[in-house]
Amino acid sequence: MLNQLSVRNVAVIDKLDINLHDGVSVLTGETGAGKSIIIDSINMILGDRANKELVRYGTDKAVVQAVFDAPKSVINILEENDIDVEDETVIITRQVTKEGKSVARINGMVVTLNILREISDRLINIHGQHDNQALLTPIRHITFLDAYADNEEYINRYKDILSKKREIEKKISSLEMDEQEKMQRIDLLEYQVKEIKKASLEKGEEDDLREQRDIYTNAEQITKSVNEAYMNLYEGDEIQSAYDGISIAVNEISQISDLNPQLKSIYDTLNEIMYSLEDTAHEIKEFGETVEFDEQTLNEIEERLDLISRLKRKYGNSIEEILAYLKKAESELNDIKLSDERTNELKEELKNITKELKEKGNVLTQRRENAAKVLEENIEKSLHELNMEKSKFKVNIENDGTFYDNGMDKVEFLISTNPGEPLKPLVKIASGGELSRVMLAIKSILADSDGVDTMIFDEIDTGVSGKAAMSIAKKLAVIAKNKQVICITHLPQLTAMADNHYLIQKNTDGELASTTLKELDEEGRELELARIIDGGEVTELALSHAKQMLENAKNN
């Protein structure tokens, strides 16, 4: 359940704080007051792309924060991502700067949009005009049916098998080439395998060769520096070496080291330095003796590096990648040479996996058919309650044996809104008002099993009025017995039936507009409902009508 919503510097909204309640809550206001910005703000919280254009003019950043009582499914996801949750409270904050940088936090911890989107469908279900358009797209109908049938697990099993089938088909296709193409490919692969194998590459070889090249190239300088270092450290001719100096110091201190503990410590340290220096000097000398300029060896190193460079240009960016290419080429070469045998093996494998896939697809079809029967009955019942008493609804399922991404079925919703008329696709029969009611009927049925506590309806009343509007209001009231329902509406019938009423207003302070939102008391509800009824100024007649509608709603 959504408990609180705070919005800062989003479009025309300067500062907005709202506490939300159970039951049906309506948001009303004149056109252009900023109702759509409220929806945009909630969508930001749910992980939609944060557009920098939403940042209020003259400010550096927009911030939206929402506080939820989260269901167990959301808490589990957050705990799996090491996000602490106390008392089932989840606080989501989304910030976007005027430069377009976006940051999302859950309970104070920065999270990715993927995590935000993973939990969003479990927190809020938003219904807008795009949902109505989804009803006019038959390819979307199967998603409604699968949601009702709880088919996600079965679809995932089907998709796993379908992926394996397509992989096998791809392998077969690559093997089934004409004879000329096959021989050309064999020649190329054999040449590549031979070329790489002949090089006898070893991992790490290139770095070792570069080190050797650096030594040979700089042999003269290395020899000079090594000799100078050795002479100064150990065997100085004209000058005293470091070793000789330390030896003298060691000899002098040794004569007095027994007189004082500190002198003994100094003697031990100097002695250790002397031996260490001697070892280092001999190590320098030995290294210098190994260094000599050998033009032939240097040429061989250069040729080897040049060979590796050529192979890298052809087969990969490193020796590791070249060797990986070799392994892949050998495998492909072997498959092609044994293509007939391998193709037959793959075709047998394809036959078995196609059988398994068909079984999975038929299971899905059966589940859809079973769910469709119940869904048809429930939607027809719901449509009758929404003032479409003569409507007939059917879920048409066709299994044509084709393996689609989500099964073997094509699903389309058909409807007849008048007695005696045949069932037809929604796109050919439904008006805007009828579409709204069909979608509401579907939403009300799916709401019982989706585990989402909050439903938001953005102008569900489009295209309806009178008795149909009252039926929508009553249907939402039924949904609100188990859900938190929030509606943006222009309907007086729905407004009167609401448990909570919020007014959205746009005010202009100087040259800058600002949207505010406040929860209305009884008197405020009467005035706003009268405005909606009259379409403008509040008249005594409209006010009287509003009071009567509110009184009637209390008694229903």
Image (cartoon, rainbow, N blue to C red):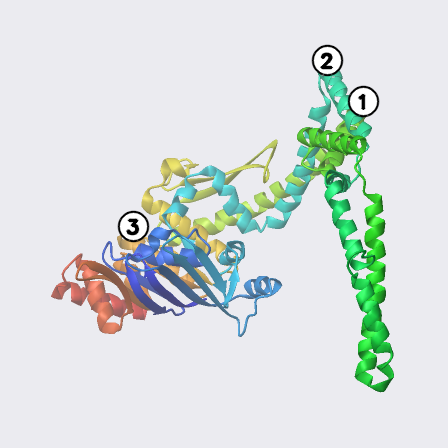
The image shows residue 181, relative to residue 407, as above or below, that is: above
Relative horizontal placement of residue 48, taking residue 150 as reference (left or right): left
| Mark 3 vs 2: CB contact within 8 A | no
Quarter of the figure with residue 502: bottom left
Q: In which quarter of the image is the C terminus?
A: bottom left
Q: Which of marks 3 and 1 is in front?
A: 1
The crowding category of the residue bearing disc 2, from other C-alpha atoms within 10 Å (few below 14, some 14 to 19, many at least 20), is few
Relative horizontal placement of residue 516, taking residue 430 as reference (left or right): left
Looking at the image, is mark 3 or mark 2 earlier in the sequence?
2
Relative horizontal placement of residue 295, taking residue 520 as reference (left or right): right
**Which residue is tagged 1?**
337
**Which residue is tagged 2?**
180
Q: Which of 58 and 463 is in front in this view?
A: 58
Q: Which of 464 and 515 is in front in this view?
A: 515
| Mark 2 vs 1: CB contact within 8 A | no
Mark 1: amino acid: Lys
What's the distance in space between the residues labelled 2 and 1, CA to CA?
Answer: 13 Å
Mark 2: amino acid: Gln
**Which residue is tagged 3?**
464
**x, y percentage for residue 369?**
57, 43
Mark 3: amino acid: Val
Looking at the image, is mark 2 or mark 1 earlier in the sequence?
2
Looking at the image, is mark 3 or mark 1 earlier in the sequence?
1
Element on which disc 1 rests: helix
Outermost residue, top side = 180
